[in-house]
Image (cartoon, grey):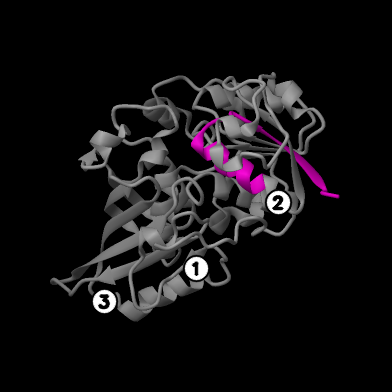
Amino acid sequence: MKRFKAAVLGGSGYGANELIRRLLLHPDVELVRVASIDYVGERLGAAHPNLEGLSDLRFENVAPEEAAAGVDVVLLGLPHRVAASFVGRLLATSVRHIVDLSGDFRLKDVAAYEQHYAAKHPCPEHLAGAVYGLPEQNRVELRGARLIASPGCFATATELGLLPLARAGLLTGTVRTLAITGSSGSGAAPQPGTHHPVRAQNLKAYKPLSHQHVPEILETLASAGARDLALEFVPVSAPLTRGIFASTFVTVSASVSEAELAEAYRSTFAGETFVRIPSGRLPEVAAVSGSNYAEVGFTLGAPHGTERTLVCFAAIDNLIKGGAGQAIQSMNVALGVDESATLKDPGGYP
């Protein structure tokens, strides 16, 4: 018999598909309820063809309080602002853990939220109590956490690529990131930016220097040791279904060596199940697509006077390590079960 029960709210999207798929396979957590305003009364396969016949559950249109009844954890795959209003109501119930995949509780700074999400926060009183769900940085804080703010996909890739530098005291000043993403990050509802005939033969920047993941990246890296950090971030829409590839350009002292950097990466991710440093190659999306694994690496340029350029790379699947998989990973830590439960499958290749 499974030890815990879970519900998913906002269950018809791409991220929810991954939540549901992995919860159906979870050895310790039983998925007992999936709520959505779409497909009400229909089986899960109506929205998620890959789940056809795997569960008798049906989509329900229920209030947050009803969704939380009798469960240990609620996972939210809801849009920004909608999620916040649900979280406020869920915190008034007896549910033990809430994992929010939206951006509503990632930032401690209310002004930064209102600037980047173009709205007043519905319940800012809960920001201080939310734990940012990057296990590689906040594992201790996640143990037993009631409200978990699961990181953004761009943020996850960029943070993992730079975390070793922050911890080593090498991350300061202005850094520049170019991050390429697949279409599934825009959600299941068709939009001009994700329409296949346009996307399949196209590359384009969007929200350059103004993306909402910038402040959470800065907050997270500052907590890891970055000093006076500024980030110039340009996201690029690419003809991929899944995946993020982030390249960050950092200026370091000419005295910094490749061996020193390699040790910083090794020590930061030693013992981390889901972060790999490839041997003999740089990170690539095809190696992690369909999985909760991340790949990180770097290239160090030749000295120019007193400085040299360091380029840090990271690759993830935006829906899994950049979304639902990481949410499950954080949930596992909060519940005290095996952190890698239902997440160790490597994905396919190519």
Label 1 near label 2: C-beta < 8 Å? no
Magenta region includes residue 108: no
Magenta range is 1-23
* Dot 2 amino acid type: His
Q: Nearer the viewer, residue 42 or 170?
A: 42
Residue at the spot of label 1: 268
Residue sitting at the far bottom: 259
* 283 sits to left or right of 175: right
Q: Residue at x 39, y 76 (%)?
A: 262
* Dot 1 amino acid type: Thr
Q: Local crowd at mark 2 within 10 Å, few (<14), some, or many (≥20)?
A: some
> Residue 319 at what x, y percent from top left?
48, 45
Residue at the spot of label 3: 255
Q: Residue at x 21, y 71 (%)?
A: 301
> Residue 132 at what x, y percent from top left?
56, 44
Is label 1 in a helix, a strand or a loop?
A: helix
> Residue 193 at what x, y percent from top left?
29, 32
Q: Earlier in the sequence, mark 1 or mark 3?
A: 3
* 80 sits to left or right of 127: left
> Residue 312 at what x, y percent from top left?
32, 62
Query: In the rendered view of the protein, which quadrant contains the C terminus?
Result: bottom left
Q: Earlier in the sequence, mark 2 or mark 1?
A: 2
The answer to whether residue 131 is seen in the rendering is: no
Give the Cα distance between marks 1 and 3: 21 Å
Q: Residue at x 38, y 54 (%)?
A: 227
* Dot 3 amino acid type: Ser
Give the Cα distance between marks 2 and 1: 28 Å
Q: Nearer the viewer, mark 2 or mark 3?
A: 2
Q: Residue at x 39, y 58 (%)?
A: 315
Q: Local crowd at mark 3 within 10 Å, few (<14), some, or many (≥20)?
A: few
